[in-house]
Image: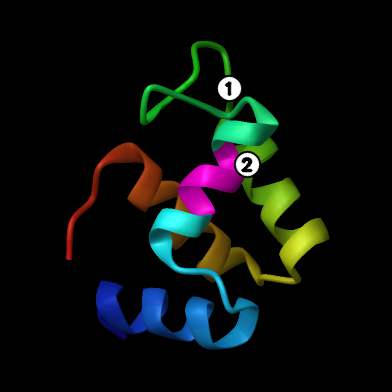
Amino acid sequence: MSFQAYLDNIQAKTGKSPDDLRALATEKGFLVQGRIAEGVKATQITDWLKADLGLGHGHAMAVYALFKGKTV
């Protein structure tokens, strides 16, 4: 599955676009000025995405990769 397909599936499941996910992560303190905040670990982000948005591990890791700067 392509990275874009992961993002499309996440949006279909959650109703959240990549920009929406970035905004939510910023509100949670995981992102600062569009970058992962110092000291924030991948597990913290993936655990949040799994708990609050119901994502599986692979999809949560795709969002983490998006936050790290991976592009489509």
Q: Nearer the viewer, residue 26 or 48?
A: 26
Q: Nearer the viewer, residue 34 or 3?
A: 34
| Extreme residue in the left direction | 72
Along the polypeptide, which appears first: circle 2 or circle 1?
Answer: 1
The 10 Å Cα crowd at callout 1, few under 14, some 14 to 19, many 20 or more, is few
Q: Secondary structure at mark 1?
A: loop
The 10 Å Cα crowd at callout 2, few under 14, some 14 to 19, many 20 or more, is many
Please tell me whether residue 66 belongs to the stretch shown in magenta. no
Q: Nearer the viewer, residue 59 or 20?
A: 20
Q: Which mark is residue 58?
A: none
Q: Could you tell whether 63 is left or right of 55 in the image? A: left
Percent position of residue 55, x then y = 67, 70
Percent position of residue 71, x then y = 18, 56
Q: Could you tell whether 55 is left or right of 31 in the image? A: right
Q: Magenta segment, principal secondary structure?
A: helix
**What's the colour scheme?**
rainbow
Q: Which residue is mark 1?
A: 40
Residue type (three-letter) at the residue carrying disc 2:
Ile
Q: Secondary structure at mark 2?
A: helix
Q: Which residue is mark 2?
A: 45
**Image quadrant where one finds the N terminus:** bottom left
Q: Residue at x 36, y 31 (%)?
A: 34
Q: Are marks 2 and 1 in contact (CB under 8 Å)?
A: yes
Q: Which residues are magenta?
A: 21-25
Q: In the figure, residue 45 lies in which quadrant?
A: top right
Give the CA separation, mark 2 to mark 1.
8 Å
Q: Nearer the viewer, residue 31 or 61?
A: 31
Percent position of residue 37, x then y = 49, 18
Q: Residue at x 58, y 22 (%)?
A: 40
